[in-house]
Amino acid sequence: MHSKSLPRSLLPKSLRRQFFYALSALALLAVAGGLMALYALRMAVDSSQQLAGARLVHMQDSQELLQRTLLIERETYRMLDGSSLEVMRGGYGDIIERLGMIDSLVARLVTGNDDVNVLALHQASQLFRNTTHIVASLREGVLQAESANSAPHARNSLSTSAERQAQEETIRHFHQELQRQAYAMATSAQGLSAHFTQNYQDAVGQLVQTSQANQRWVLVLLIGSLLLAWLVMKYLFGQHVLNRLHLVSHYLRSNDSSLVWQRVPVEGSDEIAQMARAVELLLEDRHQLALANTALETERARQEELIKKLAQVHGQLLQSEKMASIGQLAAGVAHEINNPIGFINSNLGSLRRYVEDLFKVVSAYEAGEGELKAETRSAMGKLKQEIDICFLREDAINLLMESMEGMQRVKSIVQNLKDFARVGEAERLCANLEECLDSTLNMVNNELKLKATVVKAYAGIPDIECIPSQLNQVFMNLLINAAQAIETHGIITLRTGREGDKVWVEVQDTGTGIRPEHLDRIFDPFFTTKAIGKGTGLGLALSYGIVQKHEGEISVKSELGVGSVFRVTLPIHAPRHL
């Protein structure tokens, strides 16, 4: 991920100077655009002033001139149709007055304007003035003559009919000529108005074109400014600044600390490049810190594992010492009991023989009882009745037999106690697991007899190489746990079997079962679900360690309300390190 930026030789080394030059270029472009806009506005204002000061005035004057000529044409008809001197003279006065206004308007239009239509209109007005004067004089003479003829004393003063006819013909001719000239002057004024209106429209069109041209220049300048701003934003702010900052930010946010050293691909000597170098140092420090954290986490995990093993070993050691102490005590007690049991058993055998000999003597005396005196036989009979010699002979032998059988049971218990303890026997031996189970059952019989019925399902497995005392401890823990899992009274089933070069032992109970969330933790040291004072949480952990030491396996299946099954699988041939 590399940034494409402007050539380094074209840019100052300082990012502040780069921004200054970029902003200066944008400011110059903005000033040029503003000056161009001001120039365009100035041109538009000048054109508007010229239009308002000259052409607009001419157009207004031409339109007013047209109105005046139309009024003159109307006044001409009023003057020609007037039936009295007052009406005729009023019309004539209005015509002369409006012709004066027309002359002043024509004079204003003529100033600075050499249009032929203006000159033609001026000539037409002068001609119309002369013709109006003539027509007004003729019309006045006719009206005066009509007025004189209408008087009673002037009836005979009328001219001849030929003169009147000639005069009327002349007046009619001048009437037509005056109407023609009025129409011609109105037409000329209309053409002049149209001409100046067209000039005004042409000026407006030229102004529009000038404005459009100025708008195009301003638009081009604006587009150029935007293009330059875009180029500056893209290449300077975008590629040269923002992309490089993004690269620095990307590497700064990167969580990959696996590399020994990471180089931020930002070149140059400006502030961003200096920042990139600082980020590289930070990444290196972060990498070293990650390595230190990894080493610390590894060491902490190792310490936790050692602490866990130490706790397990410590618990096993405590349990082993406890069991060793119990074994030593049991062995000592068994040894101390064994001696008196030995001579008691021997004495009981001798006593049995002595009693049998005595009864033989008594039988011999009974055989010679007939030879005795009567008094002696009578005394002997009473004595035998008192001691019930027949019952005594039979019961004494039975008592001795029962006592000898009891001593054999005590001897067997002591031997089982010695076999379970096996103090000093830490080496591997060939032992039968079924016999180990029986020996352990005899030891925990008092714990089991009130809680469960023990069912044996032995398969006659072969002897294996093991440390019997340790396996006896495993079986004792499983049997006691099975009994404690039964609330009232249940069944404990012992099974054995063989699978290839391995044998297995199962201890099944009909107790309360184990919760599923506890199954993964039952072999952890100090974990127990029993009430306080009823368990230390070391029994199954110690059993697990012993089975692992024999390279065996211990597993459990449990269902709440149904019970649990613990299976211990062991190799027939013990591992070398055992």
Image: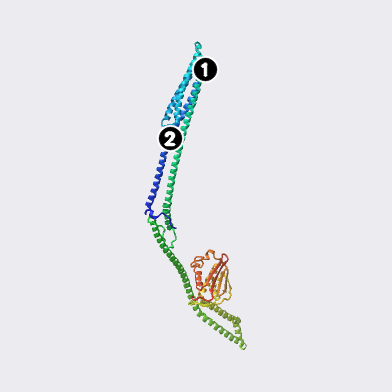
Front in this rendered view, residue 353 or 443: 443
Residues under numbered marks 1 and 2 in contact, where contact means CB atoms less than 8 Å apart: no
Q: Residue 384 appears in which quarter of the rendering?
A: bottom right
Residue 98 seen in the current view: no
Residue at the spot 47% in from the left edge and 18% down from the top edge: 140
SS of the residue at dot 1? helix
On the image, the x and y values in percent for residue 235 come to: 42, 52
* Three-letter residue code for mark 2: Leu
* Three-letter residue code for mark 1: Gln
On the image, the x and y values in percent for residue 66 come to: 47, 28
Q: How crowded is mark 2: few (under 14 residues within 10 Å), some or many (20 or more)?
A: some
**Residue lying at the far bottom of the rendered structure:** 371
The disc placed on residue 51 is 2
On the image, the x and y values in percent for residue 271 come to: 38, 55
Residue 313 seen in the current view: yes
Quick check: 346 left or right of 57? right
Front in this rendered view, residue 383 or 74: 74
The disc placed on residue 115 is none
The disc placed on residue 165 is 1
Q: Residue 199 appears in which quarter of the rendering?
A: top left
Q: In this view, does 119 lie above or below 157?
A: below
- Which of the two labelled residues, at mark 1 and mark 2, occupies the earlier sequence position? 2
Residue at the spot 49% in from the left edge and 26% down from the top edge: 183
Mark-to-mark CA distance, 1 and 2: 57 Å
Front in this rendered view, residue 137 or 362: 137
> How is the structure coloured here?
rainbow
Q: Is residue 397 above or below residue 476?
A: below
Q: Residue 401 appears in which quarter of the rendering?
A: bottom right
On the image, the x and y values in percent for residue 487 come to: 56, 66
1 or 2: mark nearer the eye: 1
